[in-house]
Image: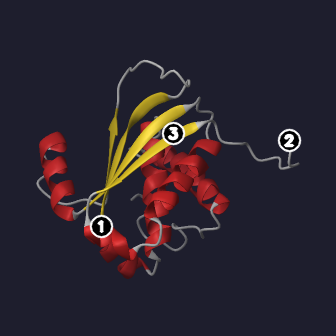
Amino acid sequence: MNEAGDSRATAPAVEVAVLVEDGGWDSVEDPVQLCTAAVSAAAAETQADAFAISVLLAGDKRLRDLNSEFRGQDKATNVLAFPSGDMAVLPAGAKPIGDIAVAYETLMTEARQQGKTLPNHLSHLVVHGTLHLLGYDHIDDSDATMMEEIERRALRRLDIADPYAGADNANE
């Protein structure tokens, strides 16, 4: 148990840098804090060491360009995760593990279609991207089940309902 008497794991030390590149994000209250909390919640549900991560809050065009350049897919997507590779530990001990990019228009469309709030869907996508950077994936059913359970636990830490409840296709 931690000092507060909570038996849940506490988050490792994380450093989160958020760059808001697209003006659409102005419609989301405090997206920087939402991203920071989402990364911390994902970290708390894993056995990760201290790490540093950056989040780019962009628009569909930027995500489409990144998706085309790095994945060969000429289409917008909701979230991309770019691992840093094997990098040195920063002086504070946090190892940079990568970058996440989120597309505003796609997030807004998906949230509306799925009956979610923009802040909750943003939090979910950042948790999802963070888990990818920590080595989790959803390529096969057993990996998807494990990753989704970690996402659910991380989102519960943020008081966000299960995003997969009633979903026909759970893998985002």
In which quarter of the view is residue 70 placed? top left
**Mark sitting earlier along the chain (1/2):** 2
From this viewpoint, is residue 45 visible? no
* Residue identified by numbered label 3: 15
Give the amino acid at mark 3: Glu
Q: Give the residue at x 63% y 33%.
A: 47
Residue 31 place in picture, x, y as percent: 44, 63
**Mark sitting earlier along the chain (3/2):** 2
Residue 162 place in picture, x, y as percent: 58, 67
Residue 3 place in picture, x, y as percent: 86, 43
Residue 123 place in picture, x, y as percent: 49, 61
Colouring: secondary structure
Q: Give the residue at x 50% y 69%.
A: 120
Q: Of the numbered discs in the image, which one, if any, rests on residue 104?
A: 1
Q: Is residue 47 left or right of residue 139?
A: right
Q: Nearer the viewer, residue 60 or 21?
A: 21
Q: Nearer the viewer, residue 170 or 75?
A: 75
* Residue identified by numbered label 2: 1
Numbered disc 2: secondary structure:
loop
**Mark sitting earlier along the chain (3/1):** 3
From this viewpoint, is residue 32 visible? yes
In the rendered image, the vertical position of residue 57 relative to residue 68, given as above or below: below
Give the amino acid at mark 2: Met
Q: Label 3 to label 2, Cα distance in Å? A: 24 Å
Q: Give the residue at x 47% y 44%.
A: 16
Numbered disc 3: secondary structure:
strand
Classify 10 Å Cα crowding around label 2: few (below 14), some (14-19), many (20 and above): few
Give the amino acid at mark 1: Tyr
